[in-house]
Image: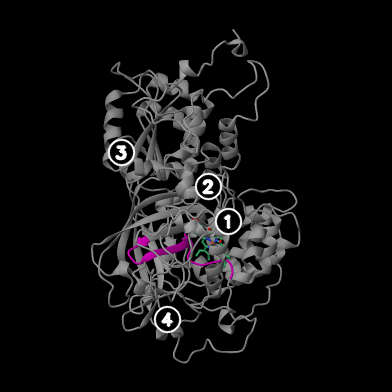
């Protein structure tokens, strides 16, 4: 019988009616619903009636489910957790969150890519947002940073230009989530101040292996202010407990095909399985004298202060231990505001920061539709808050009484008088420097101290390992190869010559171009001492913790070898995922039957940090005829990963052209050690680097 010929509605058969186990289904206005399967019709096969308020309300709400995505940082993933203070900082700041050692403050952290839309992939070459909302007892403090400590531009007035240039091109609507196109490189090559951040964006920092394995930075110089009104400059750092790790470019490209949600899934699953991501909060603290002594301006967001110059003091840790219950209500609606500072924390005159203080509040109005966005649970402070602001769209509070103005004397008549300012504990802005350089003529001008655009780009490049430098060169070659306008690459090369002649000539060679004359500089390029802290490879942690090992198995796989391997991997703090041509009913050597976690065709080796091949002779023969298995091994090798193997599996490795270097080991005790690192030395044997 066709659905349309049914005599009775199918709802009763397939869905339970409201009982103790289920709340009653109602409309948004509380009217109980008897049938959620069929719209109201005039006659069994007749037209649907306008009268059907249940249908209309449901579709009406659905039609408006989407809100404008963020203009930048649209693609993001978030989690709840807490910040725990290691030591009181009461001598430096009155900020309540930094007073009591051991105290925990709830946080909500959102990580994001910048250029792509909300539905774009997790792993493009891009900067990552690193935004944390601290729900302190004196109001919300939002530290809205990135995984790169400097920014492309010095002045907020250039931000719309930068973002227009990097996002998909205005006429064609592509490329999505990619900087490898004309308009980005056109803009960048015309804006020498962007060169330092460009080096970071072209480095492996822009290809994090996991959101849990990247650093975060507040970028701007902020101030901490103590009870005596004394200000200390501060730059904020987040250091991941799992160490820094990135992927290699070929792996990143293939990850985009393997799993759109690679980072989102990784964060979610780590938290679900109790492996809570953790970062330590660090502060670079320095005074005006130090600031004045530095050969760059601390108000210039295109500059960092090397850790070797001003050390990072670790003051606490952030642990993310709870996934959002609802992606939209929390991750999508969270509204970060750099202007959310609490007493004891203050801004500096960094012109980029100053522009942000306006922008974020403004954007929330168009995203969330109302000035009352602070009442959405994820945005509301967890401490009491009260003032005389009233009404507005979507007002959810019901203030009592008539005290909606101040001053008032309603208390004298015994009425509720409302909240009052607090001269002692209330937020007071830092007064500025005694000599008050903030008073001056009205000027649209960049200070002379912002003129040096290349010294730190050079510092960054020179602080990298040889392999990392090669990655930067090949990233620029890749991106410029996608640029169609022929005048752009030479202009970029002319700028790169100030960063490094070596880099410029490698890029020129990679593009098949001759080196142009150097561009003019606004200030001489300084020799700054390299900072090893800026390199990922120099600081990599040898660990399997938080990583994932893929094990290729098939019928006949040795049960005891597999069992021991699984135990070793788990003991090292990693996940172990079994991959085979089928998911169910794999029969091991001892006749036991097990399930694989992933089917080979959809579980390529780029999803893993290291791989092991545990096959019987027959299994190896079968896999050797399986293109996906050969590719699996080949990619693991090409992506510089450790490969563990059993004697019987060896011929599969040979078929995949694996060279037996120090990263290719027998699946015994040495595998876990090998799997704890990547083998960058192997790289020249698998691809040509410029
Ligand atoms: Fe943002 N930025 N930004 N930005 N930004 C936004 O705010 C903006 C800048 C950063 O997970 C928007 O709520 C201007 C620097 C992060 O929700 C918007 C300027 C840094 C996030 C905006 C900057 C950032 C944003 C879009 C130049 C690193 C995502 C939606 C003055 C320190 C936060 C929104 C989240 C989001 C404007 C520069 C980081 C449009 C005008 C520098 C992590 O308001």
Which tag is nearer the camera, tag 3 or tag 1?
1
Inter-mark Cα distance, 1 to 4: 31 Å
**Is the residue indicated by label 1 positioned so its CB lies within 8 Å of ligand 1?**
yes
Query: Which region shows up in magenta?
Result: 135-153
* Lower sequence index among marks 3 and 1: 1
Q: Is residue 430 left or right of residue 96?
A: right
Mark with earlier residue (1, 4): 1
Numbered label attached to residue 569 = 3
Q: Secondary structure at mark 3?
A: helix
How busy is the neighbourhood of tag 3: few (under 14 within 10 Å), some, or many (20 plus)? many
- Looking at the rendered structure, which numbered label has been put on residue 430? 4
Q: Label 2 crowding class (10 Å Cα cut-off): few <14, some 14-19, many 20+?
A: many
Q: Assign the C terminus to one quadrant of the image.
A: bottom right
Q: Considering the numbered disc 2 on the image, is that residue within a helix, a strand or a loop? A: loop
How far apart are the two marked residues, 3 and 4, measured between alpha carbons? 52 Å
Residue 461's spot in the image, x, y percent?
Answer: 52, 66
Task: Ligand 1: give its quadrant.
Answer: bottom right
């Amino acid at each position: 019988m066709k659905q349309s010929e049914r005599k009775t509605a199918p709802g009763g058969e397939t869905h339970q009616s409201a009982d103790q186990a289920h709340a009653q289904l109602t409309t948004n206005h509380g009217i109980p619903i008897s049938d959620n399967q069929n719209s109201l019709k005039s006659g069994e096969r007749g037209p649907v009636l306008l009268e059907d308020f249940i249908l209309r309300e449901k579709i009406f709400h659905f039609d408006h489910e989407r809100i404008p995505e963020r203009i930048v940082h649209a693609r993001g993933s978030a989690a709840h957790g807490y910040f725990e203070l290691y030591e009181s900082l009461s001598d430096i700041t009155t900020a309540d969150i930094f007073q009591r050692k051991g105290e925990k403050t709830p946080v909500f952290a959102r990580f994001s890519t910048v250029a792509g839309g909300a539905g774009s992939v997790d792993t493009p070459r891009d900067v990552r947002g690193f935004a944390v909302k601290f729900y302190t007892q004196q109001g919300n403090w939002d530290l809205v940073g990135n995984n790169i400590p400097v920014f492309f531009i010095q002045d907020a007035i250039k931000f719309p230009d930068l973002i227009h240039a990097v996002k998909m091109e205005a006429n064609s609507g592509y490329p999505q989530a990619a900087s490898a196109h004309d308009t980005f490189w056109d803009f960048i090559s015309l804006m020498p101040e962007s060169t330092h951040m460009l080096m970071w964006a072209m480095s492996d920092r822009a290809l994090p292996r996991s959101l849990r394995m990247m650093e975060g930075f507040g970028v701007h110089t902020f101030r901490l202010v103590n009870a005596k009104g004394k200000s200390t400059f501060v730059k904020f750092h987040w250091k991941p407990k799992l160490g820094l790790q990135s992927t290699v470019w070929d792996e990143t490209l293939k990850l985009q095909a393997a799993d759109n949600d690679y980072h989102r899934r990784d964060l979610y699953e780590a938290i679900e399985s109790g492996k809570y991501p953790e970062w330590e909060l660090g502060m670079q603290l320095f005074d005006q004298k130090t600031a004045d002594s530095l050969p760059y301006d601390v108000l210039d967001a295109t500059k960092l202060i090397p850790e070797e110059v001003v050390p990072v003091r670790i003051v606490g840790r952030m642990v993310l231990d709870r996934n959002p219950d609802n992606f939209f209500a929390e991750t999508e609606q969270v509204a970060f505001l750099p202007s959310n500072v609490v007493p004891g924390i203050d801004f500096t005159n960094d012109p980029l920061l100053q522009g942000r203080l306006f922008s974020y509040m403004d954007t929330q109005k168009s995203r969330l539709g109302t000035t009352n966005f602070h009442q959405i649970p994820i945005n509301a402070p967890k401490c009491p808050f009260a003032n005389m602001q009233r009404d507005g769209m979507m007002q959810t509070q019901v203030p009592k009484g008539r005290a909606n103005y101040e001053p008032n004397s309603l208390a004298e008549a015994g009425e509720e008088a409302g909240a009052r300012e607090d001269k002692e504990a209330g937020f007071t802005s830092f007064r500025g420097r005694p000599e008050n350089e903030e008073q001056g003529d009205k000027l649209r001008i960049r200070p002379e101290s912002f003129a040096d655009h290349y010294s730190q780009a050079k510092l960054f490049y020179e602080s990298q390992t040889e392999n990392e430098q090669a990655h930067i060169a090949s990233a620029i070659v890749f991106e410029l190869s996608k640029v169609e306008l022929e005048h752009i690459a030479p202009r970029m090369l002319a700028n790169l010559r100030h960063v490094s002649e070596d880099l410029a000539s490698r890029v020129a060679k990679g593009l098949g171009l001759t080196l142009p004359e150097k561009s003019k500089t606004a200030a001489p390029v300084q020799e700054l001492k390299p900072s090893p802290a800026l390199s990922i490879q120099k600081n990599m942690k040898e660990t399997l913790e938080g990583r994932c090992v893929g094990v290729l198995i098939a019928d006949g796989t040795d049960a005891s070898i597999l069992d021991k391997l699984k135990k070793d991997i788990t003991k090292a703090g990693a996940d172990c995922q079994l991959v085979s041509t089928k998911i169910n009913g794999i029969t091991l050597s001892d006749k036991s039957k097990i399930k694989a976690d992933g089917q080979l065709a959809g579980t390529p080796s780029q999803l893993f940090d290291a791989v092991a091949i545990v096959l019987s002779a027959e299994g190896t023969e079968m896999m050797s005829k399986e293109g996906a298995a050969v590719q699996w091994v080949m990619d693991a090798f090409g992506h510089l990963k450790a490969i563990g193997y059993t004697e019987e599996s060896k011929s599969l490795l040979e078929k995949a052209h694996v060279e037996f270097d120090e990263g290719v080991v027998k699946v015994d005790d040495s595998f876990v050690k090998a799997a704890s690192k990547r083998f960058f030395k192997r790289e020249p044997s698998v691809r040509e680097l410029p």
